[in-house]
């Protein structure tokens, strides 16, 4: 049996979300699907993924510093957090665990005073 990679988890999440929406439309209980989707979101958010799609076992601190939060990005861009979330996909951001991570390279350097 092969390991489940990020692509597999994303496909499974999409199928569960579709099924959940169909059940919601029919007013049927969706709790098992809610729990499964939440577990997949947690796995996608907490496991750093290598370029080959497999989970990384060690994370370089410099790699973590390459991403900033929506709050930090809004301060650097001089706009609201809502606006940052709107433009996030266009500037190469990724969504992890329900929060946007903005690549530092897409933002201007902070001005030194």
Image (cartoon, helix red, strand yellow):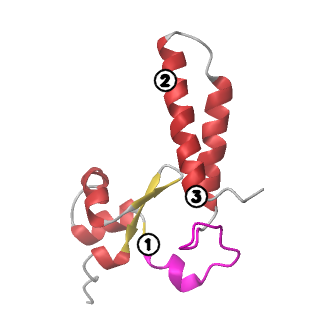
Q: Give the residue at mark 3.
A: 6
Q: Give the residue at mark 2.
A: 21
Extreme residue toward the front, this view? 1
Q: Give the residue at mark 1.
A: 67
Magenta span contains residue 108: no
Extreme residue toward the top, this view? 27
Give the mark nearest the N terminus, 1 or 2. 2
Of 82 and 26, which appears nearest the observer? Answer: 26
Q: Which residues are magenta?
A: 49-67
Q: Residues within 10 Å of mark 3 (few under 14, many from 20)?
A: many
Indicate left or right for 75 with 42 as reference. left
Measure the C-alpha gap from mark 3 to mark 1: 19 Å
Q: Position of residue 36 (x, y in %)?
A: 66, 37
Measure the C-alpha gap from mark 3 to mark 2: 22 Å
Measure the C-alpha gap from mark 1 to mark 2: 32 Å
Q: Residue 30, located in which quarter of the rendered image?
A: top right
Q: In the picture shown, does residue 56 fall above or below 13?
A: below
Q: In the image, what residue occupies the spot 57% across and 72% down?
A: 52
Q: In the image, what residue occupies the spot 26% across and 51% down?
A: 86
Dot 2: element: helix
């Amino acid at each position: 049996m092969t390991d489940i990679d990020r692509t597999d988890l994303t496909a499974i999440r999409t199928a569960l979300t579709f099924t959940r929406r169909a059940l919601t439309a029919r007013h049927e209980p969706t709790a098992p699907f809610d729990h499964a989707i939440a577990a997949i979101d947690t796995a996608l958010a907490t496991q750093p993924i290598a370029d080959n799609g497999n989970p990384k076992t060690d994370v370089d601190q410099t790699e973590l510093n390459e991403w900033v939060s929506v709050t930090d990005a809004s301060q650097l861009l001089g706009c609201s957090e809502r606006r940052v979330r709107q433009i996030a996909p266009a500037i190469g951001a990724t969504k992890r665990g329900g929060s946007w991570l903005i690549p530092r390279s897409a933002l201007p350097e902070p001005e030194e005073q």
